[in-house]
Image (cartoon, rainbow, N blue to C red):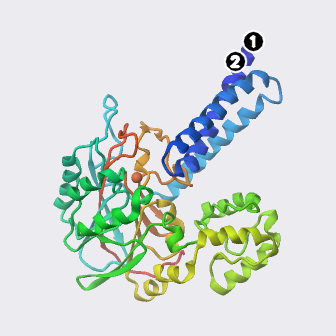
Amino acid sequence: MPLIQIWSALLYGVAGFLVFLILLNRRLILRPDGRAKALLSLLFLIGLTGGGAWLGFFLHRLPWILVPLALLCLVLLGEARRVIIRRFYAGTRSVGTVPHKVDITKPITTTDLVVHRYEVTHPKWNGKLLRIVHLSDLHVHHDLPLAYYQDALAIAEQSKPDIAVFTGDFIAGLDTLPKLREVLRPIAKLESYAVLGNHDYWADADAVRKVVHDSGLHLLSGESIVLPVGDEKILINGYDYPWNINKKGSLPQGNCRSPLSVIDRPFFKARANEKGSLPQGNCRSPLSVIDRPFFKARANEKGSLPQGNCRSPLSVIDRLFFKARAGSADPADSSLIPNAIVQESNMLHIVLSHTPDNIYWLSKSYADFVFSGHYHAGQFRIPVLGPIVIPSIYGRRFDHGHFIVNGTHLFVTSGIGVAAPPLRIYCQPDIFIVDIVAGNYSLPTQM
Ligand SMILES: [Fe+2]
């Protein structure tokens, strides 16, 4: 067999595998867990990698051999872009600890819980040091001992936090709810808040809600509260989006699914990635030439995005899909995003959102701090290179740590537990302690 054929098969195979990884990171991993997801992932893996290699045997001449090379270059460019964006959003480092610094000879880190502490000065905060402890993704599981979860909460409590935030995914399955009852309890001086995660919704949101509530935590699923702290007040919101989308309704976030938006989608996405939200009256895709004035009209009226009632001729089909995703959103949303209150009062605005994917539109909703989990920091990491898979429409951009996006501080913890399989490789579970200290206040200029 000619050497060129082997090289061609190898190149096509690698290119196919990279396409599979991109699909897995940005699409497949977002689907609900189950056999369908596993089967689909396996089919894509075999189809793209094996099929790619098989194709390479036959397409070993010019110009076909250049196709996988071009694809590899594109992937490398994408990675370079990710690194630049991450640097742009980089927040502070944890004090005295280095995340993911693990002993290379000890790859299994499933219960190697660490605490990372961050210090942030915020101009809106004028009170005494405000300590927030952040726990996420307990995923209470039969394969991990009860004491592990109880110790995690005890460690968090020992830091004497003013506020505790639990950002979802409490269980691995419904049968672990009794175990969760033995773990959960309030651990903060003032209040312990929580939102639900995708696994809670996939299992039984109401059942998890009941346990969380009965355990003394304040569940903030689609709720806003004002918490007095000394002479100051804090506004705290909880968002379960997008998993409660049918009940509460919200906007489609850069992932429109209607047949007409096939061409629009990349453009929506491009804008969503850059600016962190939906297209605001200046869609640029070929299909949206007619849509544009209508979007614009709404943007002028509301200063915001089309919310399930686009009116252009082209968007007849889109409308149904937008609407399906949006539900009866407007009134609920406007009460959930109390921009006016935040702007007028200059209260510190803290948001709990299970997925960090909400960061861009939350940053536009005047959120000062967003606490998230969901990613498990990848759960399986390669030293130096980082996570293999992150369940995010932004891929590995916000995998773990502290970021500052449009002035909003985003904290993404690795979480405490594990999703299936119950294993962490070179990826420590962690708890964040965030100390907010007073700074000189000035009105935000970038929104
Ligand atoms: Fe999770």
Image coordinates for residue 161, horizontal then vertical, percent: 22, 66
325 shown above or below 57: below
Q: Where is residue 113 in the image (x, y as percent from the top left)?
A: 26, 46
**Outermost residue, top side:** 1
Can residue 400 be seen at all in this image of the molecule?
Answer: yes
Dot 1: within a 10 Å radius of its alpha carbon, few (fewer than 14), some, or many (20 or more) residues?
Answer: few
Q: Examine the rendered structure and indicate whether residue 153 appears above or below residue 317.
A: above
Please give the residue where the numbered disc 1 appears in the rendered image.
Answer: 2
* In contact (CB < 8 Å): disc 1 and disc 2: yes
Residue 289 screen position, x and y as percent = 82, 70
Residue 271 or residue 218, whichever sits in front: 218
Q: Which amino acid does label 1 sit on?
A: Pro
The three-letter amino acid code for the residue at tag 2 is Ile
Give me the residue at 31% from left, 83% from top: 233
* Observer-nearest of 322 and 236: 322
Is residue 357 left or right of 81 when viewed as pictured?
A: left
Identified at 74% across, 21% down, the residue is 57
Q: Left or right of 247: which side holds 57? A: right
Q: How crowded is mark 2: few (under 14 residues within 10 Å), some or many (20 or more)?
A: some
Q: Position of residue 391 (x, y in %)?
A: 50, 50
Q: In this view, does 2 lie to the left or right of 344?
A: right
> Which type of secondary structure does the marked residue at label 1 adopt?
loop
Is residue 435 visible in the rendered structure shown here?
no
